[in-house]
Amino acid sequence: MFNLTLRQFRTVRAIAAEGKIVSAAKALGLSPPALTIQLRQMEEEVGLDLFDRTGEGMRPTAAGRVFIDTAQAIDERLRQLEDEIDAIKGVRAGSLRLGVVSTAKYFAPQLMAAFMKEYPAIDMRLSVGNRAEIIASLKNHELDIALMGRPPRDVPVRASAFGDHPLVIIAPPDHPLARARDISKARIARENFLIREPGSGTRISLEIFLGELPGRIDDLGIEMGSNETIKQAVIAGLGVAFISAHTISAEVETGRLVVLDVAGMPIRRQWFAVTRSDRAMSPAMATFQDFLMRKGAMHLPHLSRLYPGGS
């Protein structure tokens, strides 16, 4: 059995993160020679190199990547231990790492503000990313709770719906269909769509919506990297977009965008709070989850102000 310490595991993580001995030593509060000696001792203990020394910096070997994964698992388990002890004590404090897909950033700050007002002892940190980035953060144990429209299938999770997530089609106010009613799917499919990257929740929903029309999803339209870019492109007249109604309140209310009255829309999905099922719920996580179930929906934008058939 290897005679390794927690400090040594964290040393490997720091070297991998920083890429250079000098930078890792600074992050750990050590001198570069001391860190070099510590790394050499670990490699002698294991009998393998943990890093390749390259001109571009330190690159983990296969053995090094195993060490990094183990170090991450140890740190996560220690954090869970602290959470579990707090739960036994009945503590309703602590910290919460919240991640949200980019579409949710339009209401996440209001949710956070309401929650922190009710539970000021809980410290929250917010991360925003696209769907792939948030799922990767869940995989890497970098988030406690994620808010998204569709739970991942390749991560062990528990998911709880806390509110409606309506999807609509938007156009500039001078679009020929802006005043039309009950637009058919076949008619709207002839429009040029502005779409998100592959794998995004809204793009997947659009593919499902248009999937019954032969060949339509083979060339959906112009791909763009953010909801903001898509909205500005629609305003500029480059096409229409299938988008979350929760992202367009300001533009519709000021008359820069309109929601088209397409048959079968809005499509109603759900917002989910997602946590890993292979870790214990901390008191802070449980408190936030309870808050979402009780009050989450009231902090979502109301569709009735945007869409002729909204409620």
Image (cartoon, grey):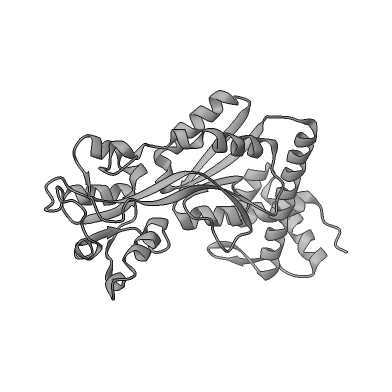
Asked if 297 appears above or below 25 in the picture, the reply is above
Q: Position of residue 131 (x, y in %)?
A: 46, 55
Asked if 45 appears above or below 86 in the picture, the reply is below
Q: Is residue 211 something one can see in this rendering?
A: yes
Work out which residue is located at the far right of the displayed protein and give it.
1
Query: Residue 212 vs residue 71: left or right?
Result: left
Q: Position of residue 8 (x, y in %)?
A: 76, 53
Asked if 202 appears above or below 111 in the picture, the reply is below
Q: Position of residue 38 (x, y in %)?
A: 76, 54
Q: Residue at x 36, y 37 (%)?
A: 302
- Count the labels in the image: 0
26 and 254: which is toward the camera: 254
Q: Is residue 20 something one can see in this rendering?
A: no
Q: Position of residue 225 (x, y in %)?
A: 34, 55
Quadrant position of the C terminus in the picture: top left
Q: Residue at x 67, y 50 (%)?
A: 32
Query: Residue 122 vs residue 74: left or right?
Result: left
Work out which residue is located at the far bottom of the displayed protein and give it.
214
Quadrant position of the N terminus in the picture: bottom right
76 and 218: which is toward the camera: 218
Q: Residue at x 69, y 40 (%)?
A: 282
